[in-house]
Amino acid sequence: MPQDREDAFAWIDAQRERRDRAGLVRRLSPRPADSPLLDLASNDYLGLARHPEVTAAAAAAAHRWGAGSTGSRLVTGSTELHTTLERELAGFCGFEAALVFSSGYAANLAAVSALSGRDALVVSDADNHASLIDGCRLSRAEIAVVPHADPDAVRKALDADEGDQADAGEARRRALVVSDAVFSVDGDAAPLAALAAVARRYGAALVVDEAHGLGVLGEGGRGAVHGAGLAGAPDVVVTATLSKSLGSQGGAVLGPARVIEHLVNSARTFIFDTGLNPAAVGAALASLRLLRREPERAARVRTVAMGLYGRLTAAGLAAVRPDASVVSVRAPSPEQAVRWAADCRAAGLMVGCFRPPSVPDGVSRLRLTARGDLTEEQIEEAADVIVRTAPTA
């Protein structure tokens, strides 16, 4: 008989030591309700998370519908509020229908896994968000990971697959091209029109994650897909989060009505998950209506992002030109990125710090999120702190 072993989790200690040596330890840092820090770390792009109309709508929804949705959407978790948000979100973004999920992560898992499957091909950008990558893994489809923002690489993957199917005497299998609209690390936008043209040529569907595009790009913040003239196309599906520009929580999938009906019947993260809580639904709906009423908010985010980028590059920092709201500033090493972020915090500025394995290229950086409610004085102050605390090597 084998002897009992003392510690089933000794391997965790070994991994922790490796993270310590590499400067890759992550720690939770709870923030107070009224933080004195200037915030360039959150994804509250439009500054709506604390808007009086949005918080009042969240409170009213909780009072009317309760603190939780009480069950899955197919049992007790759907309310009239969910239906209203889905209808208005689809209409705003130019799609036939929408379906709300408990998170943007769950929406991405649903869209990729339920629209592909074991007998399908998924062509995925190398820099896609982790939720899209996990959707690919769960799909059991064949996955072709292609170089970042490269429509010709997508074409080659689809063409090779079509040739393989023909050589085997088989009918062309269904295929999915998957991409972020705006990539979360460097803030660059995908070439959506070119991707759609390639996908259409091979009869593939295009799935686009608008997490960082909704509320920032397109007419009045309708998203990068809308801006590319692809909204409402029969072969295009969009996923989105309600936790960034809309300042709330949750996610959604938008597309043709038959796609949404298919997700209701087959998406595991919809069928087996508790519905999004009413307060989050009410807040997202209020934010959406605010954005529709005040479309200039989207343009202001882009102005703030370019203002930060201009000031930082003028000071000699290696910032990436933003296509939307994310401004990425390269750091020499993971350790220096952590120290830089800590020095910013000590100076009254909260910034994001991205390090491996969260960055696909292995380059650590500060990740700044431009908010549309920042004043010119705050933009100047933020840039000054970042420049003043920058590593010297």
Image (cartoon, rainbow, N blue to C red):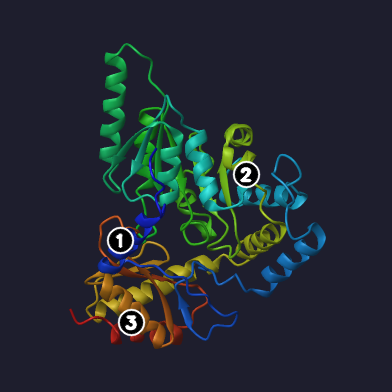
Q: What is the distance, in whole Å, between disc 3 and disc 2 at their CAs?
A: 40 Å
Quarter of the image for residue 336 reads: bottom left
Q: Position of residue 319 (x, y in %)?
A: 28, 70
Q: In the picture provided, is 144 more to the left or to the right than 86?
A: left
Amino acid under disc 2: Leu
Which secondary structure lies at badge 1?
loop
State which quarter of the image contains the N terminus: top left
- Front position in the image: 267 or 308: 267
- Front position in the image: 202 or 113: 113
Quarter of the image for residue 385 reads: bottom left
Report which residue position mark 3 lands on.
386
Q: What is the distance, in whole Å, between disc 1 and disc 3 at their CAs?
A: 21 Å
In primary-sequence order, the first of circles 3 and 2 is 2
Report which residue position mark 2 lands on.
99
Amino acid under disc 3: Ile
Which secondary structure lies at badge 2?
strand
Report which residue position mark 1 lands on.
356
Residue at the far right in the pictured view: 64
> Is residue 181 positioned above or below 282 on the image?
above
In primary-sequence order, the first of circles 2 and 1 is 2
Residue at the far front in the pictured view: 1
Q: Position of residue 297 (x, y in %)?
A: 54, 69
Tag on residue 183? none
Residues at circles 1 and 3 in contact by the CB criterion of under 8 Å: no
> Is residue 148 positioned above or below 271 on the image?
below
How packed mark 3 is, by other alpha carbons closer than 10 Å (few <14, some 14-19, many 20 or more), is many
- Residue occupying the point 61% across, 40% down: 96
Looking at the rendered image, the disc whose residue lies closer to the viewer, 2 or 1, is: 1
- Front position in the image: 34 or 157: 34
